[in-house]
Image (spheres, helix red, strand yellow):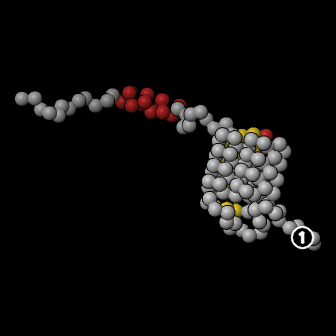
């Protein structure tokens, strides 16, 4: 009588060692990330940081993220069209689809989610932060 389950010989240790060595040499993401640009900028996604000229330390992840940014500094846009129309804004953080996509020159604004809601009401999405004199 043939049993339905047949036992096989265990895998030789050398095969296990070679398999693990191959995994160690493999890259986690193919192609590897290539988002490092001059001025400390990082962009991943179609048309992210498309119009950048002199802006520094910006991070754009997602389709059209920070696409209009020319000389804004220290902005972070994560999600499709996050901070899409920002041109000169500074120190903004937008997370989510269309987050702060109408901001142009406002600064120090934090938004999470698709609606125009500022978690830090220090500036509006269309007017820059007022400068104070000491």
Q: Few, some or many C-alpha atoms within 10 Å of disc 1 (few <14, some 14-19, many ≥20)?
A: few
Q: Residue 47: x percent and y percent?
A: 69, 41
Q: Residue 46: x percent and y percent?
A: 66, 40
Q: Which residue is at 70% across, 58% downward?
A: 100
Image position of 76 (left or right of 97): right
Q: Quadrant of the C terminus?
A: bottom right
Q: Is residue 129 visible?
A: yes
* Residue 40, image quadrant: top right
Image position of 45 (left or right of 7): right
Q: Which residue is at 83% across, 42% downward?
A: 53
Q: Is residue 89 visible?
A: no
Q: Residue 89: x percent and y percent?
A: 80, 56
Image position of 55 (left or right of 19): right
In front here: 111 or 127?
127
Q: Which residue is at 18% across, 31% downward?
A: 6
- Whether 127 is drawn above or below 38: the answer is below
Q: Which residue is at 12% across, 32% downward?
A: 3
Q: Residue 29: x percent and y percent?
A: 56, 37
Q: Secondary structure at mark 1?
A: loop
- Whether 34 is drawn above or below 110: the answer is above
Q: Which residue is mark 1?
A: 132
In front here: 6 or 104?
104
State the residue lying farthest toward the right.
Answer: 134
Q: Quadrant of the N terminus?
A: top left
* Residue 106, image quadrant: bottom right
In front here: 47 or 44?
47
- Whether 11 is drawn above or below 41: the answer is above
């Amino acid at each position: 009588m043939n049993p339905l389950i047949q036992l096989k010989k265990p895998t030789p240790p050398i095969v296990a060692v070679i398999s693990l060595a191959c995994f160690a040499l493999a890259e986690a993401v193919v192609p590897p990330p290539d988002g490092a640009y001059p001025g400390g900028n990082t962009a991943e996604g179609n048309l992210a940081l498309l119009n950048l000229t002199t802006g520094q330390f910006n991070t754009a992840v997602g389709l059209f993220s920070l696409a209009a940014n020319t000389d804004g500094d220290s902005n972070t846009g994560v999600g499709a069209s996050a901070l899409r129309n920002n041109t000169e804004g500074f120190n903004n953080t937008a997370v989510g689809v269309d987050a702060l996509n109408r901001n142009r020159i406002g600064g120090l604004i934090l938004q999470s989610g698709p609606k125009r809601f500022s978690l830090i009401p220090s500036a509006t999405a269309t007017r820059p932060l007022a400068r104070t004199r000491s």
